[in-house]
Image (spheres, grey):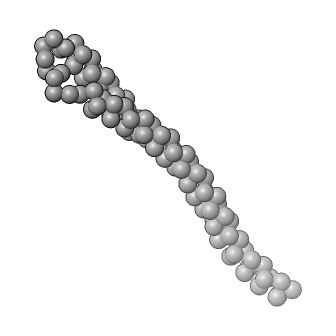
Amino acid sequence: MRESALNLVQVCQIIPQAVFQYLSKKFTASVSRSLDTEDRIFRKVKKTDDDKKAAHLKNFRPNLENPAIKLATQELNQREIERTDKFKEIVDET
């Protein structure tokens, strides 16, 4: 009987530690999966944003200062401002 009581004391000391380790692993795995998903989404959005930025830079050329194509310059500038604002919002959300 005494030996059983000692075994019970030892088991009672091990159980909370085992439960904590199990919960810690579960929580860590859950957070890790969530972060991986967010990272994948962010990288996809960033790639799209980088592609738009490259296209805008390609359209930007020295002759855009010509008064005859002032409207095209303003439109390109507005699209770039919108792109930048959208990306800033996405960064703020993540």
**Front residue of 36 and 92:** 36
Taking the spot 48% from the left edge, 40% from the top edge, the residue there is: 44
Q: Is residue 93 in sight in this rendering? A: no
Quadrant for the C terminus in the image: top left
Task: Judge left or right: residue 64 versus residue 58.
Answer: left
Residue lying at the far right of the rendered structure = 1
**Front residue of 6 and 61:** 61
Query: Quarter of the image holding residue 5?
Result: bottom right
Q: Is residue 24 above or below residue 55?
A: below
Q: Is residue 61 above or below residue 10?
A: above
**Front residue of 11 and 46:** 46
**Residue 24 horizontal/vertical position (percent):** 60, 62
**Front residue of 83 and 9:** 83
Q: Is residue 58 above or below residue 46?
A: above
**Residue 14 horizontal/vertical position (percent):** 69, 75
Taking the spot 33% from the left edge, 31% from the top edge, the residue there is: 55
Taking the spot 41% from the left edge, 39% from the top edge, the residue there is: 46
Taking the spot 16% from the left edge, 11% from the top edge, the residue there is: 68
**Residue 51 horizontal/vertical position (percent):** 38, 35
Q: Is residue 44 in sight in this rendering? A: yes
